[in-house]
Image (cartoon, rainbow, N blue to C red):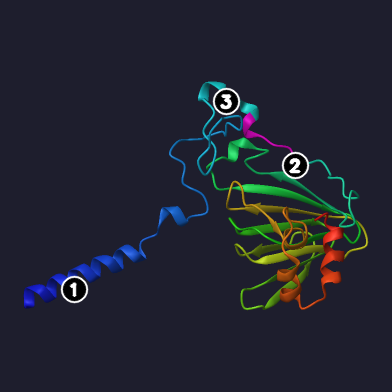
Amino acid sequence: MIKSSNSALYLLSCLTVLLLLPVPSLSADPDQLQDFCVADLKASMSINGFPCKPASKVSASDFFFDLSKEGVTNTSNLNFSITSANVLTFPAVNTLGIAMNRVDYGPGGLNPPHSHPRASESGVIIKGRVLVGFVTTQNVYYSKVLKPGEIFVIPRGLVHFQKNVGKGKALAYTSFNSHLPGAVILATTLFGSQPSMPNEVLTQAFRVEDSVINTMKSKFGS
């Protein structure tokens, strides 16, 4: 009886330790097993990432990327522009768990409410005054107007935005702990999906009439 009890206790202890150990598959990106793995974006197959370009075909230029050029902000009513340095545009970050964006804001420019499903975000304001805000899973809203040299952090998966509240242009650089953080833009996701999300779902969720949903969909091309 004592031997059986000790065995059960030992098994329980082992299970507890296993549960407390970090699980690699839950990390933002897998750890690299070599010095670098410049992504081969033309490969015919990829499994949760990109295969490595043969080292013989890697050059110095693969490891450098230009974020110095101002983006064009007046292409939409949001009046902002994002230049991304993620694995799709900067293949050298493949498997490294990092990416960056340059975010340019025209006067009143808005990076609309969105979330990053695969990464936390940090950023620094370079020019202008930018209102940065996010909402927690408990529906608590945090925000602050930031000046040049001030930084912010957005926990992974939380809905957030940035808006230029200064008199002129604004500029920020942001970084992520994933080589492809992804972006779920709320308005586009809900009202611009293809195929279109059913009106009966949206009218019930937002407690509005069918005509309101149709108007919103028409603005996002759904």
Report x, y in % for residue 122.
65, 58
In three-dimensional space, the C-alpha distance between marks 2 and 3, rounded to whole angstroms, equals: 21 Å
Report x, y in % for residue 73.
87, 50
Residue 37 falls left or right of residue 69: left
Disc on res. 58? 3
The residue at which mark 1 appears reads as 9
Q: Residue at x 18, y 69 (%)?
A: 10
Question: In the rendered structure, does residue 64 fall within the stretch colored magenta?
Answer: yes
The residue at which mark 2 appears reads as 67
Q: Residues within 10 Å of mark 3 (few under 14, many from 20)?
A: some
Disc on res. 222? none
In the rendered image of this protein, does residue 33 appear above or below residue 61?
A: below
Circle 2 or circle 1, nearest the eye: 1
Give the amino acid at mark 2.
Leu
Of helix, strand and loop, which one carries label 2?
loop
Q: Residues within 10 Å of mark 1 (few under 14, many from 20)?
A: few
The quarter of the displayed image where residue 5 is located:
bottom left
Q: Which residues are magenta?
A: 62-66
